[in-house]
Every structure is written in C-alpha cells, then in structure tokens.
Image: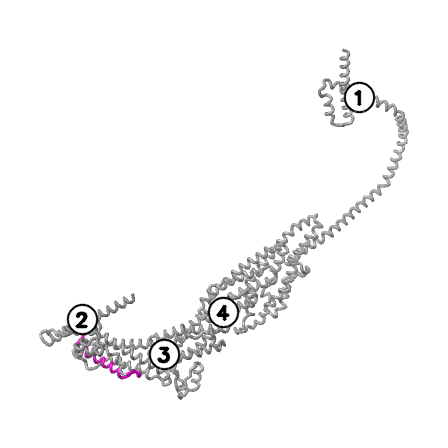
Amino acid sequence: MAQASKTVNSNSSKEENQENQIYENVFSEIETLELPLGTSLRSVYDDQPNAHKRFMEKLEARIRNHDREIEKMCNFHHQGFVDAITELLKVRSNAGKLKVQVTDTNRRLQDAGKEVISQSKEMIQCRVQQRNIATTVEKLQLCLPVLEMYSKVREQMKAKRYYSALKTMELLENTYLPQVYQYRFCQIMTENIPRLREEIKEISMSDLKDFLESIRKHSDKIGEMAMKQNIPNWLGIDDPQSQQQRTFNSIVKKQTNTSDERKWRVANGTVPEHVDEVTSEQLQDEEEEYEEEVLTAQDLVDFSPVYRCLHIYTILGDRETFENYYRKQRRKQAGLVLQPQSNMHETVEGYRKYFNQIVGFFVVEDHILHATQGLVTRAFTDELWNMALSKIIAVLRTHSSYCTDPDLVLELKNLIVVYADTLQGYGFPVNRLFDLLLEIRDQYNETLLKKWAVVFREIFESDNYSPIPVANEEEYRMIISRFPFHDSELEKQPFPKRFPVSQSVPEIYKEFKEFIYASLKFSESLHRSSTEIDDMLRKSTNLLLTRTLSGCLQSLIKKQHIGLTELVQIIINTTHLEQACKYLEDFITNITNVSPETVHTTRLYGLSTFKDARHAAEGEIYTKLNHKIDEFIQLSDYEWTMTEPNGRASGYLMDLINFLRSTFQVFTHLPNNVNHHAAMSGKVAQTACMSACKHLSTSLMQMLLDTEVKQISMGAIQQFNLDVIQCELFASSEPVPGFQGDTLQLAFIDLRQLLDLFMVWDWSTYLADYGQATSKYLRVNPSTALTLLEKMKDTNKKNNIFSQFRKSDRDKQKLIETVVKQLRSLVNVVFSRISIKNTRTVGGLG
C-alpha cells in the first residue's frame, strides 16, 4: 500500500515536472517572441483539462516573481533618482533666465536681419535669374543651329536644291536634333522631316516625269543630229550645220564628265558636299559655253532632273524603286517610239522621222548608261535594243513592201545605213539590219525592173522602127558613143548613111547602163566585197534581160500596130543588142574590178532573151502574113455552081499575090549595110514565104472541102484552077531569093494533083496507081477526093433532071457512082490500117 502510494506520488511528481517544463518553455517563448503567440498558447491547452486555469495560475506566479525583481531594482537606484530630480530643479530656474535672454537676443537679431534677409532674397532671385539665363543661353546655343539648319532646308527646297536639302536634313536629324530632342518644336521638326522627304520625292518624280515627256518630244531632234554626224560622203549631202552637229557626242561626253559625273560622285560620297550643288542653271552655263559649237545644248536635253531624282532616291534608300520606275517608263516610251505611222511608206520623211526618234531614244539611253552607273544596265539596253530591232525589222519589211518608187527605196536604204552606222557607233549590234537590206535590195531590184519596164515601153512606143540616119561625122560619133557599134563597111560609106538599128537600140543600151548604175547605188555601204557586188549587178542585169526586156519585147511583138516591117527591124535590133551584151559585161567588170575569169562570177545568161524575141518576131511575121492571107480569102466570092469559068483569075487572089510580092520586097530590099545579116534575113524571108504559100494552099483546099459548100460544078473547078495557076506562077517567080528548084511550088502540089485529077477525070489511073511511089496523084488523099466527088455528083443530079433519058449522062453518072464506091472502100481500108497501127502502138506501150 505504501509502496503503491509511493509509486503514485512518484508518477504525479513526474507529470507535474513535465507540466512545469512545458509552461516554462511557453513563458520563455512569450518573453522572447513578439508575435505570433497562437502556436505557443495552443500547446498549453491541447489534450489537458483545466489547462487554462493552471496556466493562469502559473502566469500570475511568474508575474509576481518579476514584480519582486523590479521592486528590488528600483530600491537599489532610488537615491540616484532623487539626486537627479534635485539637480533638475536647480537647472529649471537658470533655464528660465536663459530663455528670457535668448528671446531678447532673438528679437534683436530678427530686427537686425530683416534687411539682410530682404537683400539675400533679392540676391537669391538674381542668382536664380542668372542661372536661368545661362541655362537659356546654353539651350538656345543648342537650338539655334537646329533652327538654322531647318531654315536652310526650307530655303534649299524653295531654291529646288533638293539634293542639298536632303543632305541638310540628314545632318539635322542625325547630329542636331538628338541634342535638343526634349523640346516640342524639335518633335514637330522630327515629324516634318519624313513629310519633307516625301515632298522632295514627289517633286523630283514630277521633274522626272516632265523630263521623260520632254525627252519623248525631242528624241527626233536628238536622233536627227546624231544621224547627221554619220552621213557618209557618198550620199553627197552638204549640210551647213553638219560641222556643228558633229559635236553632239563630244558635248554629251563633256556633260557626262563634268556635271553628271560629279553629281554621281557626290551621291556616292567620293567628293565634298559642295560639289553636289551643280544645278540646272550651272548646266545651262556649261551648255552656253558650247553654244558656238552646237545650236544650243538645251535643245538636246537637260539630264539634271534624272540625276537629281536618282541622287534623291539613292539618299532616301529607295533607289531600286526609282530604277524600276524609270525602266518601266522607258519601255513604254520605246513601244511608242517603235510604233510607225500608217502612211510612213509614202515619203522618205516618214522613215526619217521614225529613225530619228529611235536613234534619239537609244542615244539618251546610252548616255544614261555611261553617266549614272546603274540606273540602266547594258543588259537592259540590250534587251530594249533586241526588242526594238525585231519590231523595226518587221515594220521596215512591211512598209518597204508598199514602196513602188525605186528612188524612195534607195533613200530608205541610205537612211537604214546611216541609222545602223549611228547605232553601231554607240555599241548596238546591227548585223540584222544589214541582212534586212539584202531583202530590201531584192525589192529595190523589183521596183527598178518595174520602172525600167515603163522606160522600155516608152522607148518602144516612141521608136519609128527605121534605121537611124546620120548626116555627118558628128552625128555618127554621137551614136557610136551611146552604143558600141563597129562595122568597117558602114564606116567606109559616105554620108549620109544609116545604121542598121533603129533609135530604140542605143536608148535601150543607155538604159541598161543606167540600170546598172542604179543597182550599184544600193550596194554602196553594205559592207560587201567586190565579188558580191559584182554578183549582185550581174544577177539584177540578168533579171532585166530575162524578165523586163523580154516581157516588153514579147508585148511589143504582139501589138496590132506592129507591122511586118517593124517586126523585121525588131529582129535586127535584137541581134545587135545581143552582140552588145559582152560590152555590158565589160562595163560591170570596170565598175567592180572583178575579173570575168573569176570562178564564181555570174555570166549574163540573158542572151536567150534576144533569141526568144527573134523567134517570137519571126513567128509573129508568119502569123501576121497568114492572118492577112485569111483576110483576103474572106473576100473571095466563088459561084460554086457556075457552068463556065470567067477566063481570068479571081480579083481577091490577084490582090493577095500583089500584097505578098510587096511584102517580101521588104526582106529583099534591106539597106546595103546590113549584108552581114543577109543569111538571117534571107532565112526569115524564105521561111515566111514558104509559110505564106503553105497557108494559102491549105486555105484554098479548105475552101473546096468546106462543109457549107454543098455542091461544086466543073466550071467552078476550072475557075478555081485558074486561081491556083496564079499561085503557082507567084511561087515560080522567086519572090524571095534562095529557094532551090521548085521548092516553093511544092506548097501547092496537093491542090495541083487534086485539080488535075478532076479536070482530066483520070480516075482509072488514080485507083490503079494508088499507094505506089510513082503514082501521078500521090498527094491526093482518097477521103479528099471522095468529099469533092460527092459534091460534084450532087450537082450533076440537080442540074441534069433529064439526064436519065441521055445515055452519055447515064454512063457518066454510073461512072461517078462506081468511083465513089471504090473511093469509099479505099477510105475504109486506109482507116482500118490506121486503126490497127494505133492499136499495136498502144499495146506496145502497155
């Protein structure tokens, strides 16, 4: 029990000690910590009933303990505190006295310092004002340059010195404004500077647009002056202003090396700023220095707007925009320049103005290329040139095709040459233009051929087709100088005498030389070799022979008013012209200095023209003779049922024979000085005479066999025989010398044998000997004899109504019927043989 009580007491004492330790810790925390106390207090009350009460008891005990310590400390220091209070009371009385003295002193000091205070305030105010003034002066010294620079910008813009204004703005913005950025007017300036730059850009762009408009209007003048410098001496143009205008390139170059180049160097910062102030007025001054050398430099062009605008956009960092705009506008202007007028081909002035505009355009671009270093590039100008060249060639090819005047085509060629040489001098390739000139050369030759066709026709129309008479040596030499004629027999003859040719021959020969000269003019300045020029001349001359002259001769020969005499003279003329062609070859050789022995030299192959003309003239002679014979035969008026002949030949036939006699005298009575043409004229005369006799024989035969002639009497046969006899007499009279034996009479052999057969009535011989080479009537065709016999049979029936009552008539009629049957059988046999022969021929071909 006691042990248990002891154990309980021991446990209670431990718990009490733990509780005390907890409170001790709490009080320590309360005494050492300010806030918060929640955690410490909560630990007292947690899990302990009546903890609040025990805590309060402990707390009060703690407070009483501290109070006792405080009381002990106060008792320890009480005497010192009392001594301090006693000393303080003693000081109090002295302090009152001091206060009175201090107050009095302060009053007297205040009274004495009022004036000082007043003066010090004034001094302070002055010091403040001084400081403000100094500050203001300092700030004004910073602001005045800004204002001056801004004013300078305005003045420069007013004076249109935009490049300088930009430089000033750049200096103002980068150097001066940052020093006084805090002021409001500086902010306004800062806001205005971009607007001023835009204004300068707009103004400079406006000037550029005015420049582009002006340069478009003056391009033709610039081009004209540039082209006149390249006019070659062979054009023979004497321009009083040529020497002045030759200075165009030097003036442009000088402008490039002075004002333009210096401006560009300023823009790139390679020269001092003052060099940039090269205004249009100064450019004008420079131009006026050369006023004696050119008309006026400002008439050419003032490039300063371009340079100003380029410099401005470069400074503003927008150069690419400017370059693109300039190139775009120039492309558009190039399109306008290259657009020709619809009637440009009518006059050379239209072509000249077209070329002047193009040259002016590219002269300006070449100048800009060399003066601005990048505004336009060589690639850009080459692109423009290639585009322009294609357009120019197409335009010239189209418009030149409308030209029918060779002089206009030649002037166009000269313009193209000058144009090409001018642009070649500026570095533009022009080979395609010279290739185009070769095409235009062919067209030029075509216009020449047309022109000379008119000339040849006029010469032929004005010719009298009679040998040229000369009365004296002077006239003879004049003809010889115009036409290469050499005849020793003619030279020996006394005056007056006659050339064998008519007036058209020397005229045509002279026109041949004129044509060669005209063709040569186009070949000048084409940069072709002598061999090529020689080849061109010979080819064009061949065309003149084979096309133009040949066509004119053929047309002349076919004309109705050209008679047999004229045709004979044409034959003689063409012979001499053919002989003169070798002199034309020598003439071309002398011009080109190309030997005719050269391998590639073209020969004058147009000699066949004269042979063809002679053949055509001969054929026309034969045709006209035959036509005239037909006209006479149309006058015939046979009475085919007459019983008795008239006893004399028909009148129409005698007139025809007289016409033939007089006609062939033209051939036999040629001038003595054309004896060297006797063989030629004799052959033509013989052929014409033979052709006329054959045609006459054929026409007479057709009259007998005409289907419209239904009946023919023996009297008509006898009358017809009289006419044939006259024809045979004409053939035997040798109207044209040179026929051997009875060659000409053989033309009427068919008629003679047919008429003899009917007049002799020798049918038994004809039928018996038919097909034999020795037959007396070998030339009589069975079908011809049958046709004529049937016409006579019908006549006998009609005229002998009572012939059946007379035995002789009945016998004759029976004989005719028998002969008709035999002739028909013979015709059928001949026809069968011909059919079999044709069939075999066709089969062999198959």
Neighbours of disc 4 within 10 Å: few (<14), some (14-19), many (20+): many
Mark sitting earlier along the chain (4/3):
4
Q: Specify the label residue 825 is tagged with.
A: 2
Q: Give the amino acid at mark 4.
A: Lys
Q: Nearer the viewer, residue 165 or 558?
A: 558
Who comes first in sequence, dot 2 or dot 3?
A: 3
Of pointers 1 and 4, the one earlier in the residue sequence: 1
What residue is shown with label 3? 571
**Residue placed farthest to the front in the image?**
844
**264 or 210, which lies in front?**
264
Label 2 sits on a secondary structure element that is: helix
User: Mark 1 and mark 4: span between their CA atoms?
Assistant: 137 Å
Residue sticking out furthest to the top: 1
Alpha carbons under labels 1 and 2: distance apart: 191 Å
| Eye-nearest disc, 1 or 2 | 2
Q: Residue at x 18, y 71 (%)?
A: 825
Q: Position of residue 570 (x, y in %)?
A: 37, 78
For the record, the magenta segment spans 712-740
At 19% across and 82% down in the image, what residue appears?
647
Q: Give me the C-alpha separation between circle 4 and circle 3.
A: 39 Å
Would you identify the image quadrant in which residue 692 lies? Answer: bottom left
Label 2 neighbourhood size at 10 Å, few (<14), some (14-19), many (20+)? few
Display coloring: one colour
The relative height of residue 277 versus residue 693 in the rendered view (above or below) is: above
Determine if residue 518 is in view: no
What secondary structure prevails in the magenta region? helix
